[in-house]
């Protein structure tokens, strides 16, 4: 016999870990762009073991266009699987830091 609601607890717990908004800010100052690209390059290299220029460009453009974080997470899950959530959290933290530094 299954416990009632047992299957619902895990997604709720996963959702609670996320602390990024639905969209990236589309107002990052141009002075932060090279810092962002360097950060993304390092994150991709750390996660995949190599630089992946196509992925780095995709991430960079997605963020600068202020697109949805959920769309990015879906794309990351294809490449990074279970690491995608932590990767997105790290990226969001950096983007938020850059946005606040130039606000």
Image (cartoon, rainbow, N blue to C red):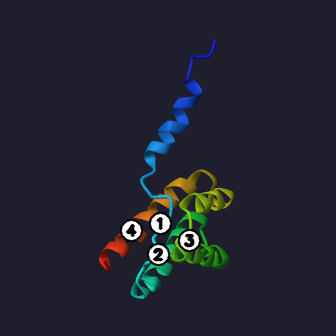
Q: Nearer the viewer, mark 2 or mark 3?
A: 2
9 to 64, vertically: above or below:
above
Mark earlier in primary sequence (2, 1)? 2
Would you name the residue on which mark 1 appears? 91
- CB contact under 8 Å: marks 3 and 1: no
The 10 Å Cα crowd at callout 1, few under 14, some 14 to 19, many 20 or more, is some
- Of residue 15 and residue 50, the one placed in the foreground of this image is 15
Residue at 51% across, 74% down: 40
Mark earlier in primary sequence (2, 3)? 2
Residue 72: image quadrant is bottom right
Measure how far apart labels 4 and 2 are at the Cα level: 13 Å
Residue at 32% across, 73% down: 100
Would you name the residue on which mark 3 appears? 45
Q: Nearer the viewer, mark 2 or mark 1?
A: 1
Measure how far apart labels 4 and 1 are at the Cα level: 9 Å
86 to 13, vertically: above or below:
below
Measure how far apart labels 3 and 1 are at the Cα level: 13 Å
- CB contact under 8 Å: marks 4 and 1: no
Mark earlier in primary sequence (4, 1)? 1
65 to 10, vertically: above or below:
below
Q: Nearer the viewer, mark 4 or mark 1?
A: 4
Would you name the residue on which mark 4 appears? 96
């Amino acid at each position: 016999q299954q416990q009632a609601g047992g299957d619902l607890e895990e997604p709720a717990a996963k959702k609670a870990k996320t602390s990024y908004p639905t969209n990236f800010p589309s107002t990052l100052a141009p002075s932060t762009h090279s810092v962002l690209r360097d950060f993304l390059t390092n994150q991709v290299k750390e996660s995949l073991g190599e630089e992946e220029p196509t992925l780095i460009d995709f991430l960079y453009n997605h963020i600068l266009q202020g697109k949805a974080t959920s769309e990015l997470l879906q794309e990351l899950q294809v490449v990074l699987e279970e690491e995608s959530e932590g990767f997105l959290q790290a990226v969001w933290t950096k983007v938020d830091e850059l946005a606040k530094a130039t606000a």
